[in-house]
Image (tube, coloured by chain):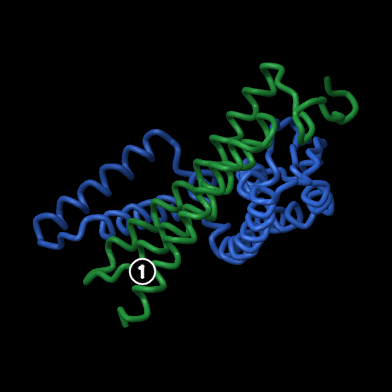
Chain colours: A blue, B green
Amino acid sequence: MRYTLGMAGALALFWLMNSGHYSPLLLTLGAASVVLVTWIARRMDVVDRESMPLHLLSRVPRYFLWLSGQIIASNLDLVRQTWSRNPDYEPQVARLPLPQQSDICRVVYANSINLTPGTLTVEISADHLLVHSLSARGMASLEGGEMSRRVSELEQ
Amino acid sequence: MSAILEPLSSVCLLLGSFLLLTGALGFLRFADFYARLHACGVTETLATALIILGLMLQATDSALPQFKLLLILLFVLFSSPTASHALAKAAWNAGVRPRDRRGRRDIALPPGDR
């Protein structure tokens, strides 16, 4: 039930923020479309813990802030490499452990690696990630496991 | 208010454009497929964020455009890493192996990989 309500709430917010028209007729139509979409989604059996990860909501902002810091730092590093006369990056490939159990945390982890420029997830297997890094430092910080630990904390 | 926001917006747009240029330059300069993908990462994270932030700071009389811009940023941040992973995986499966920074030799792979 809470996932259905969460989905209806998210859809309603999405409708209100995108519409900009608040006459009674349009609000009624909007409410009707929210109900219709929620009903279809329930019939399709896709409203569950995985599609509405409400339990992550309270922890995501903090992780996102930390990730933004990482993204800015690695962007600056890559900008320096790009404009320097002799770039000194050393490409590396390694397999990293993938301790996250739930699909959503695996996706968050692999996408976070991709979002920080300089590290790239090439392949995902059951318990490993194949990662390409532009520098030994980027690979070392991933192997240090801070990002993995923070992602794991999301699902606890 | 707009006296502060207007220059701030311009600074964000300029910085974002510079990062877009950097991404394009890196794409041309770097040696192999995977390194070039990293260069694209600059344009799709910080450059996009700065451009959208600059546009959000353009004063309007309602908050709706700001919200829509935020949604665009969110969708880009969700879809672009997935796209680069799809590219990297396709290249890996097709037998493209990473090379060193001069693009001459293949680099060492972890044990068990060919």
In this rendering, the answer to whether B18 lies above or below B24 is: below
Label 1 chain ID: B
Q: Nearer the viewer, residue B13 or A53?
A: B13
Question: In the orientation shown, which residue stands out farthest toward the top?
Answer: B94
- Residue A61: x and y, percent? 56, 64
Q: Nearer the viewer, residue B18 or A118?
A: B18
The amino acid at mark 1 is Leu
Residue B5 location (% of width, % of height) = 36, 76
At a point 79% along the width and 26% down the height, the residue shown is B104
Give the residue at mark 1: B57
| Left or right relative to B58: residue A137 | right
SS for tag 1? loop
Say left or right for A76 vs B50. Answer: right
Q: Quadrant of the image for the C terminus of chain A?
A: bottom right
Taking depth in this image into account, of B99 and A112 the one nearest to the observer is B99
The image quadrant that residue B93 belongs to is top right
**Relative vertical location of residue B83 with respect to residue A105 in this rendering, above or below:** above
